[in-house]
Image: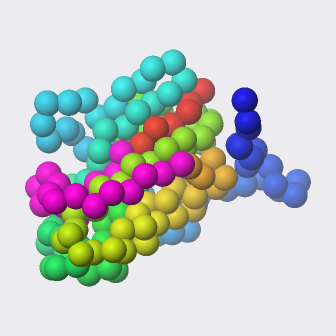
Amino acid sequence: MLEARVTTTRFGGQRMSSVKERLEKLGLTLPKAAAPVANYVPFVRVGNLVIISGQICFGPDGKLADAHKGKLGAEVSVEAGIAAARLCALNVLAQVEAAIGDLDHGVEQCVRLGGFINAVPSFAGLAPIMNGASDLMVEVLGDRGRHARSTVGVAELPLDAAVEVEAMFEVR
């Protein structure tokens, strides 16, 4: 089996900052894990894997901002789409924390992110939007945040959200 993980607890003899410290440096805090909006559970743990159901771009107040409703390539700007993807990733991390309790000691690796971008058919800039989520995952988890990924454009998302992100993590 190929091993792509890079240990990040020590780098050059120095301790890496904790998830909380990295979030603080970014001016972010983990929100409360959102309750499901339909008939599903927010996460499932199977052995050392945690699968996170799709998380939409709820803000710190638990609401969907008007700037994050609608379609990329129409009423949602690229900048707002990237910000929406970052919020989705933050909500994913909140669900992981709810599932395992401790992101610093419990997360081995973000294995995969799946991104769904609510977009008009002609919108071709899906990857940069999803980079908002991917970049945040690496900013917060370091090399443990590097992941495989799929990104697809869709005709509609729950609550007219601009972005939804699902995830899979290897945990202890």
> Can residue 30 be seen in the rendering of this structure?
no
Residue occupying image coordinates x 66% and y 52%: 143
Q: x, y (%) of residue 90?
A: 40, 55
Q: x, y (%) of residue 122?
A: 24, 75
**5 to 155, vertically: above or below:** above
**122 to 159, vertically: above or below:** below
Query: Going by the image, does 25 lie left or right of 113?
Result: right
**124 to 138, vertically: above or below:** below
Residue 99 placement: quadrant = top left
Residue occupying image coordinates x 36% and y 45%: 166
Q: Split into 4 quadrants, where in the image is the N terminus?
A: top right
Tally the marks. 0
Q: Residue furthest front?
A: 122
Q: x, y (%) of residue 167?
A: 42, 43
The stretch in magenta equals: 148-166
Q: Residue furthest right?
A: 13
Residue occupying image coordinates x 51% and y 69%: 26
- Answer whether residue 136 is magenta in the image: no
Q: Which of 9 and 29 is in front in this view?
A: 9
- Answer whether residue 152 is magenta in the image: yes
Residue occupying image coordinates x 41% and y 33%: 51
